[in-house]
Amino acid sequence: MKKNTLIAASMAAVISLSPVFTTNAFADVNTDIQQKDAKLNDLKSKKADLQADLSSLVTKLESAQAKSKELQASFNKSAEQLKKLNADIAAINARIKEREAVLKERARSMQVNSNSNVYLDVVLGASNFSDLVDRVSAVNTIVDSDKAILDEQQKDEDALKSKSASVKKEQEKQQKAIASYEEQQNKIEAQKAEKEAVVAQLAAQQATTEQEKSTLVAQRDREAAAAAARAAAAKEATTVQPIAATETKTESSSNTSESSSSVASSSNSNDDSSKSESNTSAKKSSSNTSSSTNNSIATPTGSGYDAMISTAYAQLGKPYSLGATGPGSFDCSGFTSYSFRAAGISLPRTSGAQYAASTKISSSQAKPGDLVFFSYGSGIAHVGIYIGGGKMINAQNDGVKIDSLSSGFWAQSLVGFGRVANF
């Protein structure tokens, strides 16, 4: 009887304590789950903010590109106007030279036509005073007319030259404005790339947090099921039974416990095996990823420079267009990327990114095939391919052409040289 009473008291204590242990365990897991939910909400909020920023940057980028294209169209129109003005100036100069030649020939004829002065002969040949006045007036009119024509042509030439200088000055302003918008585009693209990288990081953190939350939820469910099973067993154990039945029940419970331990051990063994396989798989995946990354690095061959530079020269004369990557038209970084691709070398899209990816070298170390970079105020805004002799081939407002690095515009904008391939 005392034994039955002791058993009942023990079972009652187990029942009374189990809810406390279970509640505490559930409280800890639920707290962890709530923390994961809070973290997920924070990550989602940050992602939403960044996505809004990215959308704004895309709008700004499109606006800058549109403005740059508009300026480029104005620049092209000015170039056509300048071309026509230069043709007009050349035509006027040709006419002036022709008239000057006629006047010189006329003067020469007067000198060599006879021993007498032709002008004097014309005057002395007058039959009367009225005829004399008419003859002198006619000669003077011819001379004055020729001089007036020359003066008018000279005025026209001066006016055209003045207008040409004005158009050139306007072109310089347009060129600087286009360069400014290209620089702005580079900055926006750099900001966009940074925010995209952060969004990718947040997405990875979100995926990890969601996985951790799923693990906690599964853990809570397992613990809840185990607690329910323990509570059912404890409730069943509180039923008072005859001693013989109780002993039988105890032996049965002992066997069940041993069986549970065996199952748990087996489960743990399986879990360890699963973890081992998972780790092995992860290592293999990491190894494969590393191998794939190394294989993607371009290794220029001995003929790489010839392929690159011949491709670059083949583009001479093609027009400039912001954001264009060929083959019909190019912007500066689109041209360098297109040329190096012929040598199996992949360059980043923008001039700023190409600068960041290159190994900086001094002007004395520069050799054909290196990149040369320029800035119009702050940040890299232009890139060309160095061809030696202080010259580069590049895509600029006038299209793909060869420029001297010592010319005023390029000399004052030069940043330096960068190497992306050891040809």
Image (cartoon, rainbow, N blue to C red):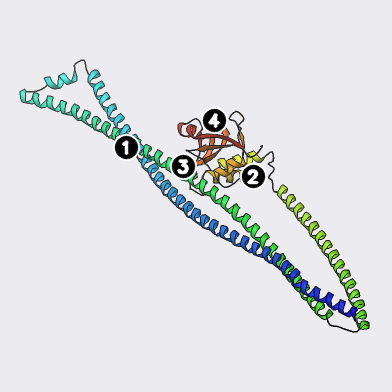
Comparing 158 with 322, the one in front is 322
Label pair 4/3, CB-CB below 8 angstroms: no
Percent position of residue 50, x then y: 55, 56
Q: Which of marks 4 and 2 precedes in the sequence?
A: 2
- Residue topped by disc 4: 390
For the residue marked with disc 1, what is the amino acid? Lys
Residue 396 % position (x, y): 48, 41
Q: Disc 1 to disc 3, how far (Cα)?
A: 24 Å
Q: Which of marks 1 and 2 is in front?
A: 2
Label 3 near label 1: C-beta < 8 Å?
A: no
Residue 319 visible from this viewpoint: no
Which residue is depicted at the point 49% across and 43% down? Answer: 183
| Circle 3: element type | helix
Which residue is painted at 48% across and 51% down in the image?
Answer: 61
For marks 4 and 3 on the same chain, the one whose residue lies earlier in the sequence = 3
Q: Do the residues labelled 4 and 1 touch (CB within 8 Å)?
A: no
CB under 8 Å between discs 1 and 2: no
State the CA–CA distance, disc 2 to disc 4.
Answer: 24 Å
Q: Quadrant of residue 76?
A: top left
The residues tagged by marks 4 and 1 sit, at their Cα atoms, a distance apart of: 32 Å
Picture quadrant of residue 386? top right
Q: Disc 4 on helix, strand or loop?
A: loop
Label 1 or label 2, whichever comes before in sequence order: 1
Earlier in the chain: of badge 1 and badge 3, it is 1
- Alpha carbon separation for disc pair 4 and 3: 22 Å
Which residue corresponds to mark 3? 179
Q: Name the amino acid, label 3.
A: Ala
Name the residue at the bottom extreme. Answer: 242
